[in-house]
Image: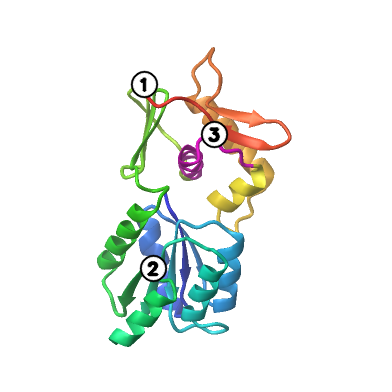
Amino acid sequence: MAKILVVEDEQDLATLMRNWLEREHYLVEVVDDGLAALHQMRVSKFDLIILDLMLPGLNGMDVCRLFRQSHGTTPILMLTAKDSIEETEAGLDAGADDYLTKPFHFKVLAARLRALLRRGANATDYRLRVDDIVVDTSEYKVTKGGQEVHLLPKEFRLLEFLLRHRNQVFNAEELLTSVWESDSDALVDTVRGHIKRLRKKLDTPGRRSIISTVYGLGYKLEGSDA
């Protein structure tokens, strides 16, 4: 379940994109200003950014350029009402990974996003495994020992994130940034509650939990490939 930042100041289009992408099972945040977008891109973790070219505060070209200059590596799909070769070239030179001209069909947008996500180093595998647990990120399905386990959306997102960053330690604040929306009311206790529920649903009695608590530091997912 990828986390996507949509940067678009046309409110109707931004709402349509949010609704479409959420139906496609993406976690979506929307901002409508270039400066606000650059701030979110620097303080939060996203799997992909949809960036409009014409924005108040700071245009999309400058947002993209400044983000890349600060060593941001998140894939960026740039949107524009202009379709000139020069404009496309300038956007790609600024650091965009792909370019889409308005108006566009949402199926085309979704296909472009899937292609960009496949390029990401952490998004190349659609079936993730640990011990006897299999996570199918294309079907949003989790099985343990061949039996389906029903997870809530945030539980699924948290499990996927930890699987893609196996053996890395994250504190609760880092998990909030990576898994929850920035404007969410979720607290540190929310993370603890989700970790507890994942353990209850996925751990094998008598065996060590796949999600370890590293006291004073945070949590990490352990286990061997099945």
- Look at the numbered disc 1 and give the secondary structure of its residue: loop
Please say if 150 is above or below 94: above
Q: Position of residue 22 (x, y in %)?
A: 40, 57
Front residue of 89 and 84: 89
- Asked which quadrant contains residue 199, the reply is top right
Q: Which residues are magenta?
A: 154-170
Q: What whole-number distance in Å separates the C-alpha atoms at marks 1 and 3?
A: 22 Å
Q: Is residue 155 covered in magenta?
A: yes
Tell me the distance, in whole angstroms, between the alpha carbons under discs 2 and 3.
35 Å
- What residue is drawn where x is 39% and y is 53%? 120
Q: Residue furthest right?
A: 216
User: Which residue occupies 35% across, 47% down?
Assistant: 124
Q: Amino acid at mark 3?
A: Asn
Within-10-Å neighbours for mark 1: few <14, some 14–19, many 20+: few
List the residue tagged with mark 3: 167
Q: Which residue is mark 2?
A: 17
Residue at point 33%, 53% (across, down):
118
The three-letter amino acid code for the residue at tag 2 is: Met
The local crowd at label 2, few if under 14, some if 14 to 19, many if 20 or more residues have their Cα within 10 Å, is many
Q: Is residue 25 left or right of residue 218?
A: left
> Above or below — where is 60 with respect to 118?
below
Quarter holding the C terminus? top left
Is 221 included in the stretch rendered in magenta? Answer: no
Residue 197, position in %: x, y?
55, 32
First in sequence: mark 2 vs mark 3: 2
- Between circles 1 and 3, the one closer to the viewer is 3
Disc number at residue 145?
A: 1
